[in-house]
Image (tube, rainbow, N blue to C red):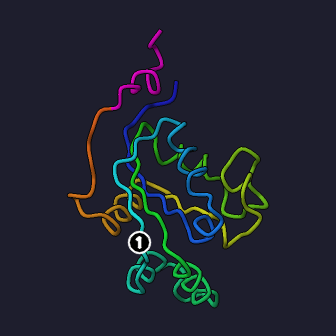
Amino acid sequence: MSQQQEEKTLIIIKPDAIQRSLFGEILGRFERKGLKIIGMKMMRIEDVVIEEHYEHLKDKPFFQTLKNYMQSSPVVVMALSGVNAISATRLIVGPTKGYEADAGSIRGDLSLSGQSNLVHASDGPETAEKEIKRFFEEKELFDYKKPDYKLVYSEDYF
């Protein structure tokens, strides 16, 4: 039996997903999995936030292209929570390059690109914590109970 741990993670629905009207499809996949939306907003990402978020790529020759892409339309940022939320969202999203992603994942079903890959998902607990703080103030995050919690998370419900 895998260890269950409640986690929070950040998702960014990127410009290509917004422009292709895929937001509802993508949101639905996280909801159907049983993840809880604890924060969500549409926004334009300012230069300073992009540079902080993609700091590990700032010296790459494609950084300006990435920055232009991330500012080409609004994005939707979401904070999600749930048992093993980080690994669950990474599985739902699929690998970075859409052409390498398995069918059934967001990128596998909806993307062929390496850069225009629809979604960003936090890659670990420390990253998720930093990213959530980058995009949300504490007052923008909500704690509430979902009535389906036991059905979604319990391994010994029945």
7 drawn magenta: no
Identity of the residue drawn at 51% across and 81% down? 71
- Please give the range of residues in magenta: 146-158
As drawn, the residue found furthest toward the top would be 158
Compared across the picture, whether 125 is left or right of 30 comes to: left
Question: Which residue is at the front of the view, 39 or 19?
Answer: 19
Q: Quadrant of residue 143?
A: top left
Query: What is the quadrant of residue 17 in the picture?
Result: bottom right
Quickly name the residue at label 1. Answer: 43
Q: Residue 91 in the image: x percent, y percent?
A: 61, 46
Residue 120, percent from left and from top: 54, 63
Q: Amino acid at mark 1?
A: Met
Identity of the residue drawn at 54% across and 37% down: 32
**10 Å crowding of disc 1: few (<14), some (14-19), many (20+):** few
Snapshot quadrant of residue 113: bottom right
* Helix, strand or loop status at disc 1: strand
> Does residue 68 appear left or right of residue 115 in this picture?
left
Furthest residue in direction front, as rendered: 21
Most frequent secondary structure within the magenta stretch: loop
Label total for image: 1
Q: Is residue 137 above or below residue 3?
A: below
Relative to residue 155, is residue 70 depicted above or below? below
Q: Position of residue 36 (x, y in %)?
A: 40, 41
Image height of 36 relative to 146, above or below: below
Where is residue 152? Give x, y as percent: 47, 27
- Residue visible at 38% across and 62% down in the picture: 41
Tell me, yes or no, whether the highlighted magenta stretch contains residue 151: yes
Q: Residue placed at 30% from the left, 33% from the top?
A: 145
Question: Considering depth in this image, is 2 or 152 the residue closer to the camera?
Answer: 152
User: Which of these two is toward me, 110 or 51?
Assistant: 110
